[in-house]
Amino acid sequence: MSSKTETVIAVINLFKAYSDIKAVDGISIDVKMGEVFGMLGPNGAGKTTTVEIIEGQRAPDSGSVTVLGMDALKDVRAVKEHIGVQPQSPALFPTLNVQEIIDFFRSLYKKTIPTQEVIELVSLQESRNVLVKNLSGGQQQRLSVALAFINDPDIIFLDEPTTGLDPQARRTMWEVIETFRKMGKTIFLTTHYMEEAERLCDRVAIMDHGNIIALGRPQQMIEDHFKESAIQFKMSDYPGQKAMASLTGVTKVVKEEEEEIILYTDNVPSTISSLLDLASERSAELSDLFVRQATLEDVFLKLTGKRIRD
Amino acid sequence: MKALKSVFLAHYKQFVRDRAALFFTFIFPIMFILIFGWAFSDPGINTFNIGLVDQGSPKSFSYIVEALDHIILDEDRNVFDIQQGQLDEKLQLLQDGELDAVIVIPEEMDSALEQVQSVSLQLYYDPSQISHQQTMIPILNQVVEEIDRSIQGNVRIITLEEQSVQSHDLRYIDYLVPGILGMSLMFTGIFGGIPIIQQRQAHIIKRLGCTPLRRSMLIFGELAFRMILVILTAVLIIVVGRLVFDVQMVGNWASLCGIVILGTLVFSCLGYLIAAFVKTEEGAIPIINAITFPMMFLSGTFFEVSNMPSFIEPVVKIMPLTYLGDALRQIMVDGSPLYPMTTDILVMAGWTLVCLVITIRFFRWD
C-alpha cells in the first residue's frame, strides 16, 4: 500500500506575488505517498495560494511543481484527473440534489467511483434527493469532500475542511479523513486549527507571511521547541514580566492582551508553588489556572510572537 | 461531449426548478400576446372595403350598389364601403391590403339579366384572411341571392366566382406576434450572462476548475440549453398565435429556425459582454434592464415606430432587436420589410462578432 518513501508532490522554490504582496515567498515542499501532510498558518499566510498552484488553478511567478511525476504547471488537465480537490467553500449548483451533483462530477472524469459508494462514504444516504441549497453546512462540506474523492484520486487536497463547522460536524469530517488515510490516499490538508493538525497530520508545515517557518512531525516539533510544559492562568494584579520570569523554573513568559498569562516551565510543581507565594504576597487573585503540555499553537506563538487565529 | 451533456442537463434541471425563470421564459410572452392581442384586436364585424369594377352593365351596377348599401351593421353604419374603379387599380389596392374584396360586373350582365341567362361575377379576395372568409363572403352571397330573387324569382342565374388573391393586409396581431417572439429571444439571450455571473460569484466556476472540465464547456453547454429553450419558446408563441388569433406562420420553418438561433446568439453574446464587465448579479440586472427596455419599446415590438424625433432614429437603427423583429416579421407573416433580409442578417452577425471579440478580450473566469 503506502511505502511513505515515494514523493508524490515536489514543490521547489515557489514564488507568487500579488502586486506588492509576496503571497508565496520561495517555499519548497516534499510530500510522500500515503501521508497526511498539513499546512498550518493564519489566514493570509499563503496556504491557499500554495495549494491552488499545486492543483493547477493558478500559475506561480517562478518555481517548479511536480505532482505524481507530472509537471503540474504544464500537464494541468492530466494532473486534475488524478487528484481530488475540496476547496474552501463548497460552491455547488444550489438547485441540484446530492445524487445529481455527484453524477455531474462523475461525468467529468475518466475513472470514477460508483455514486452509491461515494454517498455512503460521507453518510449522505438519507439526503440523496435533497437539493444542495437545503443541506446543512456540515452536509454541504461532506458532499464537497465526497466530490474530491469521486475520481478515486491518488492525492486529496482539503482546504480548511472544518472551518465554520460545529464540533459534531468537525468530528464527522475527521472520521472521513481517517477513512481516506486508511485507503492509502495521500492527503494535503490546510487548516488554521492546531488541534486538527496535531490530530490528523503525519507532518506539518507551519506557514507565515509566505514562508515555511517550521516543518516536521507535530510531536517532534513540539519537543524540539519545548522541553517545558505550559501553565496558563489569569491574574487580577499582574506583577510584570520580570517578576514572572524570576519564578522558579520559568523559561519564558507570554502575556496576551486578554488577561491570560502563559508560563513555560521545566519544573511545574516549583513554579506553581512560587506563583502561589507571589500571589498571596500581593493578595492577587489567580483564576482559570491549568497546566498543559505545549502544543503546535505554542510553537507558532514562540516562532512568530502571535497567536495563529488572529 | 459527456461533459457538454452534463452541463446541459445541469442547466435544464436548474431551469425547471426555477419558477421565476419558467414564468419569464414561457408565460410572460404569452401574456403579452393575449393582453395586447385582445386589447387591440379588430372588432368582430368590420366595415369591408369593396372595389366595384363595372365593365359595361350600368343597370346591374346600380342594383348591386343599392343592395350593398342596404346592409347595415348598427345605427347607420354600413357594412360595405364601395369604391368604383378600374380592375388593375382595384386589384393592386386589394394586394396592398387597402381593399378587402373586388367584384367585377361583366359587360354582358345587363343583357343576361334581361334574357334570364346565367351570369357569373368575379369576386377577388384573400381567403387566408379569416374574417373575410367567415363573414364577408356569406354576406356577399346573400346579397347576390337577394338581387337574383328580386329580379327573377326562383330561377338562380347569378353566381359569384371566387378568385383568391394574396394580400398584405396584416392585422395588428400579425404584427405583434413576431415582435413578442423577438422580445422573448432578447430576454432569454441576454439573461444567458446571468448564470455565468452567478456561478462565478458563488465560486462554482472555480470549483469546477479543480476538475478536468474545460471551462468553455460551461458556456457551450449552457448555450446549447438556451437554444433548445428559444426554439420551444418560438413554437409555443406560434402555436398560441395560431390557436387564439389565427396568426398564420407563412414562411419557411428552416429560415425561421435560423433567425431564431441568430437572434438568440446576438443577445447571448451581449449577455456575455455584460458578464465580462460586471461581477455581481445585483449589478448586472439594472444594466440588462437599461439595455432591454428601451430596445423593447423603440424597436417596434408592440407598435410600428414611425414619426420618431430625428435624434432617436440613429438609436433605433443600431438596435439589434429592430433587425431581429424585422426578419421575424418577414418570415413569419410575410410582413413588408423595413430592411432587406441580408441587411437584417448582417447587422445581427456584426453585433454578435463585436460582442464576442470584446468579451474574449475582457472576460475573466475568476
Image (cartoon, rainbow, N blue to C red):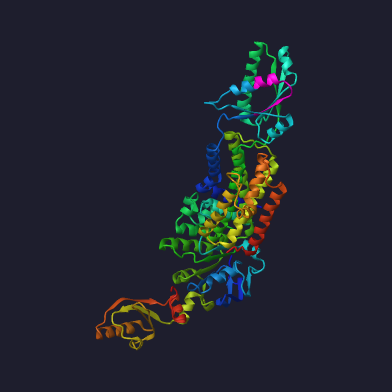
Q: B164 or B312, which lies in front?
A: B312
Q: Position of residue B195 (x, y in %)?
A: 56, 55
**Residue B72 occupies quadrant:** top right
**Which of A133 and A87 lies nearest the eye of the viewer?**
A133
Q: Is residue B16 above or below residue B284?
A: above
Position of residue B209 measured from the top left corner of the image (x, y, whole percent)? 59, 62
Pinpoint residue A4: horizontal percent, then vertical percent. 58, 70
What residue range appears in magenta?
B50-64
- Give x and y (percent) for residue B186: 60, 50
Q: In this view of the protein, which residue sits in the foreground, B186 or B191? A: B186
Can residue A16 be seen by looking at this rendering?
yes
Outermost residue on the top side: it is B154
Q: Is residue B233 magenta?
A: no
Residue at position x 61%, y 67% in the image: A56
Q: Quadrant of residue B312?
A: bottom right
Query: Is residue B58 shown in magenta?
Result: yes
